[in-house]
Each structure stands twice: as C-alpha cells, then as structure tokens.
C-alpha cells in the first residue's frame, strides 16, 4: 500500500494553487502524520505513481521540503526522511509543549457540544484503528485529532508554527508502533482531553495535551537514541534567505 494512500487530499482554498503545491501539501501531511519512518528513502517515481502525477511537480515539491528541512538530500538523486538527533527532538518538544498547550486551551474556551462530539468521534476512530493493529490509519487519525483541536483555537499563526514543527517530528511517531501499540497510555491523554472539554475546563485541556506530549516523549526519545544518528539523517536546517 502506498504511503500516501491513506492521506485524504484536503481541498484547496487557493484558486492559483499549482499541481506542485498540491503534491507538497500531501507529502507534508504524510510527514506530519508519521506515514514515513525516520531514515526512509523517498523516490520521485513512487510519489508520482501514488498521486498519479508527473515527475516534475513531485521534484518541485520535494525540493521545497528539502529547503524547509522536512526532507534531506543525501546524494545527487537520493532523498530521505531526516532522523532527528535527540537534541533536535528536545528542541522541537519544548516548542510543541508551549504552543500546543496554548492552542488547546484557546480551543477549549471556544468549544461547544457539537465540536466536542466531532473530536470524540475522531478519538474513537483512532482507538479502534489502534486496537485493530492498523497503525498507519491510527497515526493519521492522531494527527487529525490534534489539528482539529488546535485549529478550533483560531490562532492561525500559532497553528501554522505547530504544523511546521510536526513536519520533522511526525516521522518519529512511527517508531512507537507496533512496540507500544497495546499501551493504554497512548489512549488515555486523548480521553482526558475529551473529558476536560465536557467539563468546560480549558486549563485541564491544556494539561491533558501537555501530558500527551510528555508521555510520547518518554517513548520516542529512547528509541531515537537507540537508533543512533548519522550526519546524512540529521534534520537539515532550513536555508536562510
């Protein structure tokens, strides 16, 4: 199955969006959701085939992601998903903890019953896919849960920064499965978010999201350290303009 087959294409709100832009959005979301693993090689032909497009827009989209640090060029024609160093992971984690907590708290202050029901439906689907061992779908639903919550905050600039942090971070999520696929602490933080939303407690929602991130860190960081790092798999720093 293609790495991109489960990534639902989002509607474009820009009439001027090019095919390259569309490929970029889909690749970026695949990275965010953990569809690719750290160190995995990505070929233009595989992406073009999965998305049913020509090679040119794929090359353009991949070059854009390389310049942003979402992908790494390790040879004339070799592109890989960066493997975060523990130091890079910790830097991203610290930023996520602050910003995602802020967005979650702001979203909770605006939440109504319909929104909470929508978020709970995503959580239940996530739990079901996880229990079934469909970890690719579970990872996508995990990303959907978080960004459905954060987007409800209407803090568009903050959410944009969070999205940019998830691009290099997302592939590390794939390391959790299947090793921790049956662990209940992967489910409880999301349940705590829903419960806090129903109680109308924005502060508790923030605490639940911060706990979710902290629980994930406790699993992912040792796995990254065990993998080791090599220069070509480190996160490529975005070029300065």
Image (spheres, helix red, strand yellow):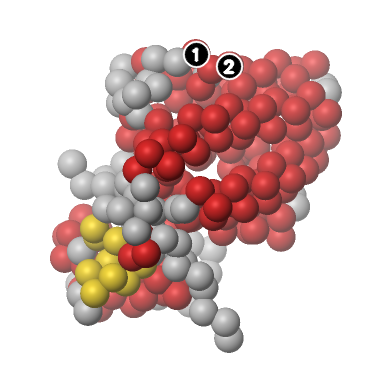
Counting the numbered discs, the total is 2
Secondary structure of residue under mark 2: helix
Residue carrying label 1 = 184
Q: Crowdedness of circle 2 by 10 Å Cα count: few (<14), some, many (20+)?
A: some
Seen in the picture, residue 43 relative to 39 is either above or below; the reply is below
Secondary structure of residue under mark 1: helix
Residue 194 placement, left or right of 170: right
Residue at the outermost bottom position: 241
Residue 68 placement, left or right of 56: right
Residue carrying label 2 = 188
Residue appearing at x 67%, y 18% in the figure = 192
Residue appearing at x 45%, y 62% in the figure = 235
**Residue 194 location (% of width, % of height):** 66, 21
Residue 196 placement, left or right of 43: right
Residue appearing at x 38%, y 39% in the figure = 226
Q: Crowdedness of circle 1 by 10 Å Cα count: few (<14), some, many (20+)?
A: few
Specify the quadrant of the image occupied by residue 176: top left
Q: In which quarter of the image is the C terminus?
A: bottom right
Mark 2–mark 1 Cα distance, whole angstroms, equals 6 Å
Front position in the image: 90 or 13 = 90
Front position in the image: 183 or 61 = 183
**Residue 61 location (% of width, % of height):** 36, 71
Specify the quadrant of the image occupied by residue 174: top left
- Do callouts 2 and 1 mark residues in contact (Cβ within 8 Å)? yes
**Residue 159 location (% of width, % of height):** 66, 53
**Residue 168 location (% of width, % of height):** 47, 55
Residue appearing at x 69%, y 33% in the figure = 210
Task: Mark yes or no: residue 147 visible.
Answer: yes
Q: Quadrant of the N terminus?
A: top left
Task: Mark yes or no: residue 9 visible.
Answer: no
For residue 209, the mark is none
């Amino acid at each position: 199955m293609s790495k991109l087959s489960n990534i639902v294409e989002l509607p474009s709100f820009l009439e001027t969006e090019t095919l390259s832009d569309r490929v970029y959005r889909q690749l970026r979301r695949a990275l965010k959701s953990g569809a690719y693993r750290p160190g995995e090689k990505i070929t233009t032909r595989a992406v073009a085939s999965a998305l049913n497009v020509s090679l040119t827009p794929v090359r353009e989209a991949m070059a854009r992601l390389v310049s942003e640090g979402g992908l790494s060029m390790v040879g004339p024609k070799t592109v890989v998903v960066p493997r975060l160093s523990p130091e890079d992971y910790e830097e991203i984690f610290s930023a996520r903890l602050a910003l995602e907590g802020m967005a979650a708290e702001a979203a909770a202050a605006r939440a109504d019953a319909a929104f909470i029901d929508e978020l709970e439906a995503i959580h239940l689907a996530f739990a079901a896919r996880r229990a079934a061992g469909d970890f690719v779908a579970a990872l996508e639903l995990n990303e959907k849960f978080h960004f459905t919550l954060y987007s409800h905050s209407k803090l568009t600039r903050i959410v944009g920064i969070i999205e940019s942090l998830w691009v290099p971070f997302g592939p590390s999520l794939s390391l959790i499965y299947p090793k921790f696929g049956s662990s209940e602490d992967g489910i409880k933080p999301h349940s705590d978010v829903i419960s806090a939303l129903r109680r109308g407690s924005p502060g508790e929602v923030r605490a639940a999201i911060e706990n979710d991130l902290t629980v994930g860190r406790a699993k992912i960081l040792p796995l990254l350290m065990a993998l080791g790092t090599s220069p070509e798999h480190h996160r490529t720093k975005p070029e300065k303009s």
